[in-house]
Amino acid sequence: MNAHTHNHQQHHHHHADNEKRLLWAMILTGGFMVAEVVGGIMSGSLALLADAGHMLTDSSALFMAWAAARITRRPADDDRSYGYHRVQILAAFVNGLAFFAIFVWIVVEAVQRLLDPVHVIADTMLVVAVLGLVVNLATFFVLHGGDQADLNLKGAIVHVLGDLLGSVAAISAAVVILFTGWMPIDPLLSVLVALLILRSAWFVTKRSAHILLEGTPEEIDVTELRETVTAQIPDVLDVHHVHVWSLTTDRPLLTAHVQVRSGVEYDTVMQQIKSVLNERFGISHSTLQIEYERCADK
């Protein structure tokens, strides 16, 4: 079995495993969401309702992530020569945007609660929040065991972390209300969770947008790549018109023009370049134009 076949099988295994983890996370999150909505209404807690709203969005986000993982299986065709791998990046981008909407809703609701305080039944709030924490921890560990290079999975984890923080905030607020009766702690801690959600939203949206815009992978320096190829392969004179982008977070692609010395055997220098790109920069798919004379596109 060659390295390419091994890597392909390993990638397929990670993909199938991630898909199962997303399905279980969706079931756990969606199942408890109903209980949290009921608990939030009964107790009058914004922290619980905010977390329930977040879990509703997360259930939808996890469904999109799971569906994207399944769609990615579809083979390439004439209309989509790279297949459907980008669907998972698109799903991650949509999930990131959903975070911003959640942030705005929580902040607006919290301001209203501060201006017009609502009585919270702390003991009911505490029971539901503790149960929510247990469910969110279980969901987090289910997802965290998957392939962390998958941005779609990472986006789902960020959603669950937001739920986890929401449960912690709700527990803290319930304890404060039980012992002091200070109601403003409920909306105040909700805003704190909203700020943490905003930070996560920025990370997921920025990273997925960079990939969708065909940006150069953050871990690859194009100048270093050009210098490395010319330094390690004596027959290479110049590397130009270099374009590096990502199909997904773990699949960088490259096209480039390579000027070589006259008389160099085409296949030999091609394999040498591809070897350097794969071993040094993790680029296993590259399209190279070998040139002996002046570049035709200059």
Image (spheres, grey):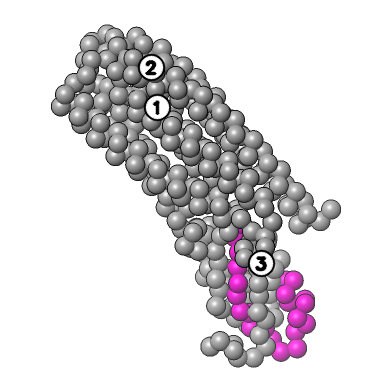
Q: Nearer the viewer, residue 60 or 168?
A: 60
* Above or below for 255 versus 93: below
Magenta stretch: residue 266 in it? yes
> Is residue 291 shown to the viewer in this render?
yes
Marks 3,1: beta carbons within 8 A: no
* Above or below for 160 versus 72: above
Whole-number angstrom distance, CA of label 2 to CA of label 3: 51 Å
Q: Say left or right for 51 vs 208.
A: left
| Amino acid at dot 2 | Gly
User: Looking at the image, which residue is at 49% across and 42% down?
Assistant: 155
**Which residue, given by chain and number where applicable, does mark 3 sit on?**
78
Q: Say left or right for 269 vs 123.
A: right
At mark 3, the secondary structure is loop
- Marks 3 and 1, the one that precedes in the sequence: 1
| The furthest residue to the right | 1
| Amino acid at dot 1 | Ala
- Marks 1 and 2, the one that precedes in the sequence: 2
At mark 1, the secondary structure is helix
**Which residue, given by chain and number where applicable, does mark 2 sit on?**
39
Whole-number angstrom distance, CA of label 1 to CA of label 2: 9 Å
Q: Say left or right for 100 vs 149.
A: left
- Marks 2 and 3, the one that precedes in the sequence: 2
Marks 1,2: beta carbons within 8 A: yes
Dot label at residue 52? 1
Of the two numbered discs 3 and 1 in the rendering, the one whose residue sits closer to the viewer: 3
Residue 231, percent across and down? 63, 73
Q: Nearer the viewer, residue 10 or 126?
A: 126
